[in-house]
Image (cartoon, helix red, strand yellow):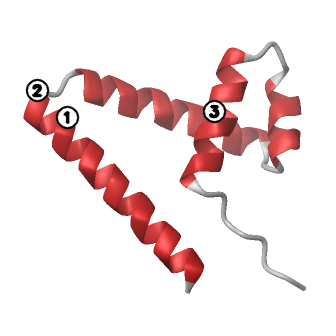
């Protein structure tokens, strides 16, 4: 049995974007992206919390947070290529 691959940060972000901006039911979006309904809802909550945190940061703090996120994404991509 093959292990299911973990969703990338890009696919998570796309699923959240579609769920929040389309008129599709969240269950349909979750199914379309091959994730569970509760997983999609958790991603949406996490996305909202991180947006709220970024809104409260000063310019340099915001830049550091964005660079850390980019660094994490690059590490994940590198691991996927190994």
In the displayed structure, would residue 65 be above or below residue 28? below
Task: Specify the quadrant of the image occupied by residue 42.
Answer: top right
Please state which of residues 15 and 50 is positioned toward the viewer in this rendering.
15
Tag 2, which secondary structure? loop
Q: Residue at x 11, y 26 (%)?
A: 58
Q: Which residue is mark 3?
A: 16
Q: Is residue 58 left or right of residue 36?
A: left
Tag 3, which secondary structure? helix
- The Cα atoms of the two marked residues, 1 and 3, are separated by 21 Å
Q: Residues within 10 Å of mark 2 (few under 14, many from 20)?
A: few
Q: Which residue is mark 1?
A: 62
Q: Residue at x 71, y 25 (%)?
A: 19
Tag 1, which secondary structure? helix
Q: Are marks 1 and 2 in contact (CB under 8 Å)?
A: yes
Q: Are marks 1 and 3 in contact (CB under 8 Å)?
A: no
Image quadrant occupied by the N terminus: bottom right
Measuring from the top left, give residue 41's x and y in whole percent: 66, 34
Task: Specify the quadrant of the image occupied by residue 43.
Answer: top right
Q: Residues within 10 Å of mark 3 (few under 14, many from 20)?
A: many
Q: Is residue 78 left or right of residue 43?
A: left
Of the image marks 3 and 2, the number of the one nearer the N terminus? 3
Q: Which residue is mark 2?
A: 58
Measuring from the top left, give residue 9's x and y in whole percent: 55, 52
- The Cα atoms of the two marked residues, 1 and 2, are separated by 6 Å
Please state which of residues 67 and 52 is positioned toward the viewer in this rendering.
67
Image quadrant occupied by the C terminus: bottom right
């Amino acid at each position: 049995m093959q292990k299911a691959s973990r969703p990338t940060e890009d696919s998570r972000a796309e699923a959240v974007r579609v769920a929040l901006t389309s008129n599709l039911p969240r269950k349909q979006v979750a199914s379309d992206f091959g994730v569970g309904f509760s997983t999609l809802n958790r991603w949406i909550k996490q996305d909202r919390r991180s947006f709220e945190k970024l809104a409260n940061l000063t310019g340099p703090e915001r830049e550091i947070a964005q660079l850390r996120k980019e660094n994490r994404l690059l590490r994940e991509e590198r691991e996927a290529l190994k």
